[in-house]
Image (tube, rainbow, N blue to C red):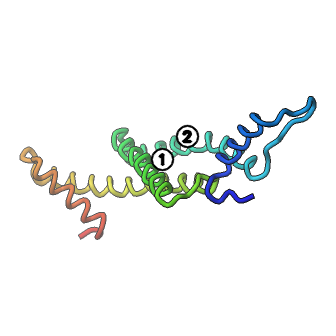
Amino acid sequence: MDIANVDVGSYVKKAQQVVNENIELPPGYSIVWSGQYEYMVRAEKKLRLVVPATLIIIFLLLYPNFKNVTESLIVMLSVPFALTGGLWIMDLLGYNMSVAVAVGFIALAGVAAETGVVMLIYLDISYKKYKEKYGSQFSQVHLAEAIEEGAALRGYGQR
């Protein structure tokens, strides 16, 4: 059976619907959907626990680093944007959801959080430097310069 253009879960749900509508099983008989579908269902149940636990662990690791809930949440907010981009590219390329893709999304969430940490660290360094330099004269212009410098440091390293 070739299901190249559809994921296993969607195919089995459609097949279950067709079977339920067209076949009446005699008493004592049942149909069990197994194989790759069974593995996918098991993995999906595990991922429903693992993904939230992973997000909580990421937050618990971020908080001691920043010692600030706001900055930790800023980093955490980068994760949904990265995952949305991943879903868009999957749709654009015509890929189907699978266990391997779900694991890849967990890795993507980790990379997004890590990138967010690096970005925020360099932004903090630059912001504190400009805040010290200009004190009460610190303005929106200086904030923009601090952001630009933080981005440059992130890309090219310390000067």
Task: Give the residue number, with chain letter if any, for mark 2.
Answer: 52
Q: Identify the image quadrant of residue 73.
A: top left
Provide the secondary structure element on which disc 1 rests.
helix
Q: Please tell me which residue lies in front, 24 or 42.
A: 24
Q: Residue at x 67, y 46 (%)?
A: 9
Q: Amino acid at mark 1?
A: Leu
Query: Mark 2 or 1 closer to N-term?
Result: 2
Q: Residues within 10 Å of mark 2 (few under 14, many from 20)?
A: few
Image coords of residue 12 (percent x, y): 71, 45
Q: Amino acid at mark 2?
A: Pro
Residue lying furthest front: 22
The C terminus lies in quadrant: bottom left
The circle drawn on residue 61 is 1
- Position of the N terminus by quadrant: bottom right
Question: SS at mark 2?
Answer: helix
Which residue is at 53% across, 56% downward? 107
Please indicate, yes or no, whether residue 60 appears anywhere in the rendered image: yes
Q: Is residue 66 above or below residue 94?
A: above
74 with respect to 125 (left or right): right
Q: Is residue 117 left or right of residue 47?
A: left
Residue 49 in the image, given as x and y percentages of width and height: 62, 40
The tag on residue 7 is none
Q: Point out residue 99 in the picture as x, y percentages from the top left corner.
A: 64, 53
**Foreground mark, 2 or 1?**
2
Q: Nearer the viewer, residue 104 or 97?
A: 97
Q: Nearer the viewer, residue 70 or 24?
A: 24
